[in-house]
Image (cartoon, rainbow, N blue to C red):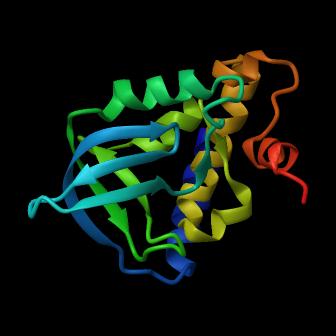
Amino acid sequence: MKKLTFICILIGSCICPIVQAETITVSVVRITDGDMLVVLDSNKIQHKIRLMGIDAPEKKQAYGKRSKDNLSTLVAGRYVVVEYDRRDRYKHIPGKIMLSGKDMNLEQVASGMAWHYKEYQDEQSRADQLMYSEAEVDARNAKRGLWYDPEPIPPWEYRKLKKPEY
């Protein structure tokens, strides 16, 4: 399976258009939840970073605190590199968080603390789409994190259930 993934990544990188991502090195000052953090750049300007390609449980949702705690263990108080190419409609930066060459977004999925957010996977490279998807399947099969629950509710479904009706 790993060999097939590598071949798909290699082929995908050859035929997919390359989007030039910008990078910024920042200090992580606060973890909002399992897929959002607040950082300071070298000019002491604060930015909200949404971890691209993933969706973590909401704060009041099952595994919400554990997801936030896991992300905190990974990056809180550290300098990270954020790869990004835009801001979203909320002025957040959807980005890939890199620490010592490791993808922290992928780590959240692999540890069972977030879903690969397939609705927005077009934001990702084909290689990342494949790796995140495979990491989710591996976490699910190993019953890691939220996958210990036999029927975890995805955050996008949870948000629909909690949306107030007018």
Q: Quadrant location of residue 47?
A: bottom left
Horizontal and vertical percent position of residue 107: 48, 35
Whether residue 69 is visible to the viewer of this picture, yes or no, is: yes
Extreme-front residue of the structure: 166
Position of residue 19 in the picture relative to residue 55 (left or right): left
Position of residue 151 in the picture relative to residue 61 (left or right): right
Extreme-left residue of the structure: 43
Horizontal and vertical percent position of residue 44: 12, 58
Horizontal and vertical percent position of residue 37: 39, 46
Residue at image position (59%, 49%) is 54
Front residue of this view, candidates 41 and 60: 60
Position of residue 52 in the picture relative to residue 8 (left or right): left
Residue at image position (36%, 50%) is 97
Residue at image position (34%, 63%) is 83
Whether residue 1 is visible to the viewer of this picture, yes or no, is: no
Horizontal and vertical percent position of residue 166: 90, 60
Residue at image position (80%, 41%) is 158
Q: Eyeballing the image, is 148 above or below 7?
A: above
Front residue of this view, candidates 112 and 60: 60
Front residue of this view, candidates 72 and 13: 72
Quadrant occupied by the N terminus: top right
Total marks drawn? 0
